[in-house]
Image: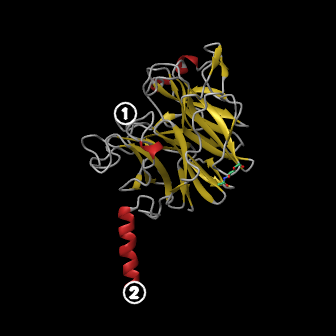
Amino acid sequence: MKSGWLLWILCGWLLHTAPNCPAQEKAWMLGPFSKADTANPVLGPLPQTVFRCPMRNAMVAWEANHVFNPAVTIKDGKVYMLYRAEDTSGAAGIGAHTSRIGLAVSSNGTSFVRNRQPVLYPAADAARAFEWDGGCEDPRVVRAAEGMYVLTYTMWDRKTARIGVATSRDLQHWTKHGSIFSGRFRNQWSKSGAIVCALKNGQLTAVRINGRYWMYWGDTDIWLASSPDLIHWTPVLDSAGKLLPVLSPRKGSFDSNLVEPGPPAVLTDQGIVLLYNARNDDKAGDTTLPAFTYAAGQALLDARNPAIVKDRSAGYFIRPERPYELTGQYKAGTVFIEGLVRFKGKWWLYYGTADSKVAVAVAEK
Ligand SMILES: *[C@@H]1O[C@H](CO)[C@@H](O)[C@H](O)[C@H]1NC(C)=O
């Protein structure tokens, strides 16, 4: 008994001092995640890959500046990553460059072979007005039951961010379907669409709840939307007809400044587990984290009513620690989680580091 208590004290001490100590705040949470330090960062910018941009009608080094914010899925037993790549156009500053989405494939989760061409980018198509010249940003991908992949991403026209949706069968060739919202929400600022999925044959696959698909989205509060087909979405509103806030920032906490969905949400036996990104406030935040740090938490939502939060982690489960996470294009430090797969019997969580590179963390459960 005595040694048992000693172990607890030791573990408590370790938890307090070692940021990577495997421990889980709540039983329903995914993880604990350990960063793959020997392999990270798994993707960085490449100056030599060029493609002919149909908008500029010129060769562009489309991933020369930064690569970050990855989506992932499994196909033919391999990890397929769709990542945001920035060229060097535009002035210095966050979001000033044109973004396109590239594709990289890995047999072991850490070593990626990239396509030379981006797979989703601004072109003379129906989405042009929403995507030029800011571009296509921050993808999230899920598998639909029909063997179709559905990608949500930010269409950025430098005025309004809108979630766009695209579909593909091979992850190489994408069909754009434009803005997920129409009618009075067509010009709604929207970002970060995380569709509710469940593990089917080891694949995170979009699932219906109460006959519809569900998506968490937003980048101040987290909001909710539903859809009959994964392409056309309707926001969930409160009784006054306003967007219903599902998860909001908390004072004094790592998520005091904003909350924003991470990878696709996972329906488990205990409810829907939503891994979310959060920014720390400079005045009302967690004083142990630098102002405006992006760290990530987890929330548990009701499996029968995705608008109801049942529980929430008090603290973050991943935060910037390594040099490439602590600074980069985004100076305040970022682990921006966007990609999650079940691969080789583990969870693999892919994230953008300081808006500059891509890294991965792995969990047994
Ligand atoms: C992953 O695969 C690459 C290429 O095949 C190899 O060089 C690397 O060592 C592998 N990494 C691990 C952790 O197995």
Beta carbon at label 1 within 8 Å of ligand 1: no
Residue 87 coordinates in the image, percent (x, y): 56, 24
Residue occupying the far right of the picture? 76
Please give the count of numbered marks on the rendered protein: 2
The quadrant the C terminus occupies is: bottom right
Question: Which residue lies under the disc numbered 2?
Answer: 1
Q: Residue at x 60, y 52 (%)?
A: 198
Secondary structure of residue under mark 2: loop
Q: Is residue 229 something that shows in the picture? A: no
User: Horizontally, is 58 left or right of 246 in the view?
Assistant: right
Mark 2 vs mark 1, foreground winner is: 2
Residue occupying the far left of the picture? 283
Verify CB contact (< 8 Å) between mark 2 and mark 1: no
Give 35 or 233, whichever is nearer the viewer.
35
Rendered view: 22 above or below 282: below
> What type is the residue that disc 1 sits on?
Lys
Q: Residue at x 52, y 48 (%)?
A: 265
Label 1 neighbourhood size at 10 Å, few (<14), some (14-19), many (20+)?
A: few
Give 217 or 284, whichever is nearer the viewer.
284
Label 2 neighbourhood size at 10 Å, few (<14), some (14-19), many (20+)?
A: few
Rendered view: 36 above or below 354: below
Residue 110 coordinates in the image, percent (x, y): 63, 49
Beta carbon at label 2 within 8 Å of ligand 1: no
Question: Which residue lies under the disc numbered 1?
Answer: 242
User: Horizontally, is 148 left or right of 279 in the view?
Assistant: right
Residue 13: quarter of image: bottom left
> What type is the residue that disc 2 sits on?
Met
User: Horizontally, is 234 left or right of 123 in the view?
Assistant: left
The quadrant the N terminus occupies is: bottom left
Residue occupying the far top of the picture? 57
Residue 60 coordinates in the image, percent (x, y): 62, 20
Residue 68 coordinates in the image, percent (x, y): 53, 37
